Amino acid sequence: MTFSTSSVSQHIEDGKLDAKLSMLTKICEATESRERSSSREFTKVKDYLSKGANINCSDWSGKTSLFVAAENGNLDIVQSLLERTNTNPNKGNKRDGKTPLHVATANGNLEIVQLLLQRTDTDPDKESKAGDTLLHSAASGGHPNILQLLIERTDLDPNTENKVLKEVIYMIVLL
């Protein structure tokens, strides 16, 4: 399903945007994976936000715009979304319950992880449906720089086991 600028504007005016696939999610998906978003796409995001788009609506899988931007490494879009106080940084997807912070950690996006952790309403202890913590995501993704950042925090327990009884310490040793 694709939207034109005029059709999205009409959905916003009609109050139907939440019932449709989030335009912001589509914009984030359209940007190149793991690269900074182009200025054109970034401008589109800012335009839709200024028109009142609900930044917390999600697609069928529960992915919000913030989730997709964090997953794809779109730093500019993540930063723009996090500047809004009504952005929910803890909303997990429906499949595995991972949050934007989980996917940014698993994908090794240090700058996005740092941005998300700067928000006081981001929950660094939120677990996925499999019981994975941020430390599990960083260790299984093989990202020692993010592991270092997370281990330095006093609010995360490296001895936490996930649902398959893997401790973070054990996973780190395997790196």
Image (cartoon, grey):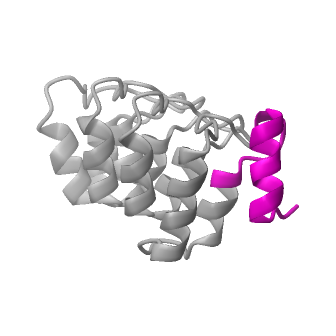
Q: Which residues are magenta?
A: 1-24
Quadrant housing the C terminus? bottom left
Residue in front for this viewpoint, 28 or 111:
28
Up the image or down, 2 lies above or below 167; here it is below
Q: Point out residue 60 in the picture as x, y percentages from the top left corner.
A: 80, 42
Residue 173 or residue 37, whichever sits in front: 37
Above or below: residue 95 compared with residue 76:
above
Q: Position of residue 112 (x, y in %)?
A: 33, 53
Residue drawn 47% across the image and 34% down it: 132
* Spot occupied by residue 3 in the image (x, y as percentages of width and height): 81, 62
Residue at x 40%, y 29% (from the top left corner): 85
Q: Is residue 7 magenta?
A: yes
In the rendered image, residue 122 lying in the magenta stretch gets the answer no
Rendered location of residue 21, percent (x, y): 79, 47
Q: Is residue 6 visible?
A: yes
Residue at image position (35%, 23%) is: 121
* Furthest residue toward right: 1
- The residue positioned 20% from the left and 23% from the top of the image is 155
